[in-house]
Image (spheres, rainbow, N blue to C red):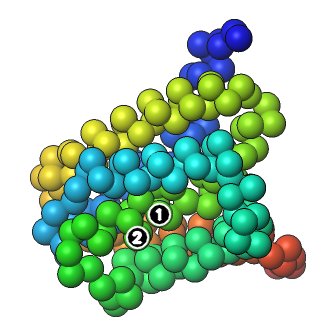
């Protein structure tokens, strides 16, 4: 079996763009402020495990529960919508009493391992070797781990005001992503206003 280095780089870049760990930094900092701690290893491993399940058995796994990828994406869009509203309005929907709880929802799922990532992984399987995707995904999760470990560093660089501005901005972006995910998976057509 021949694995091309160029394919690994290409798939890595696609997954890196979809996972968008850099864009999630304000959200992660906000969650760390609420919980006091982010367990970078636990978050990374849970997200990695979820994505590996999707890589090797995504659609059949959902099929066991009678769920298709579109329904899963719509469910993820609601989680992202609530998270975006939290960031923009300052309302708390996700009650996080313990740092361990914040490892799963919303950081591991749907921020890192989200509906976009799942559909991308399934789409990539049609074009690339599974091992190429596996290697690229593994490299991405190493990057995710180091970004999660460095949230205090990013917080120092951005400062309190910078974080508040980015928090609102990325909250609006999350709302837009949630709406796009919902619309694209429900088949709703929006009329363009001229």
Q: Work out which quarter of the rendered image holds the N terminus and state it.
A: top right
Pick whichever, 89 or 100, lies toward us. 100
- Estimate how packed mark 2 is, as few (under 14), some (14 to 19) or many (20 or more) residues with alpha carbons within 10 Å: some
Task: Report the disc number at residue 109.
Answer: 1
User: Residue 7 placed where, x, y %?
Assistant: 65, 20
Q: Residue furthest front?
A: 64
How far separated are the C-alphas under marks 1 and 2?
Answer: 5 Å
Q: Is residue 51 above or below residue 70?
A: above
Q: Residue at x 44, y 30 (%)?
A: 139
Pick whichever, 137 or 14, lies toward us. 137
Q: Residue at x 62, y 26 (%)?
A: 131
| Mark 1 vs 2: CB contact within 8 A | yes
User: Residue 58 placed where, x, y %?
Assistant: 68, 52
Q: Work out which quarter of the rendered image holds the C terminus and state it.
A: bottom right
Say whether residue 15 is left or right of residue 47.
right
Say whether residue 31 is left or right of residue 173.
left
Q: Is residue 59 above or below residue 94?
A: above
Task: Report the disc number at residue 6.
Answer: none
Q: Is residue 188 visible?
A: yes
Q: Residue at x 44, y 52 (%)?
A: 47
User: Residue 177 placed where, x, y %?
Assistant: 59, 67
Q: Residue at x 32, y 63 (%)?
A: 103
Task: Report the disc number at residue 105.
Answer: 2
Mark 1 element type? helix
């Amino acid at each position: 079996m021949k694995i091309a280095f160029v394919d690994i780089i290409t798939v890595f870049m696609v997954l890196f763009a979809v996972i968008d760990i850099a864009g999630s930094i304000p959200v992660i900092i906000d969650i760390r402020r609420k919980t006091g701690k982010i367990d970078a290893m636990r978050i990374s491993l849970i997200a990695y495990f979820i994505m590996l399940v999707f890589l090797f058995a995504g659609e059949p796994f959902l099929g066991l529960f009678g769920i298709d990828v579109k329904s899963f994406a719509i469910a993820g869009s609601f989680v992202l919508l609530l998270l975006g509203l939290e960031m923009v309005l300052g309302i708390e929907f996700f009650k996080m009493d313990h740092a361990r709880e914040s490892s799963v929802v919303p950081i591991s799922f749907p921020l890192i391992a989200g509906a976009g990532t799942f559909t991308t992984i399934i789409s990539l399987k049609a074009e690339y070797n599974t091992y190429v995707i596996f290697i690229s995904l593994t490299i991405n999760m190493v990057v995710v781990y180091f970004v999660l470990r460095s949230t205090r560093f990013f917080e120092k660089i951005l400062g309190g005001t910078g974080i508040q501005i980015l928090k609102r901005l990325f909250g609006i972006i999350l709302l837009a992503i949630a709406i796009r995910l919902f619309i694209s998976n429900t088949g709703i057509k929006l009329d363009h206003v001229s």
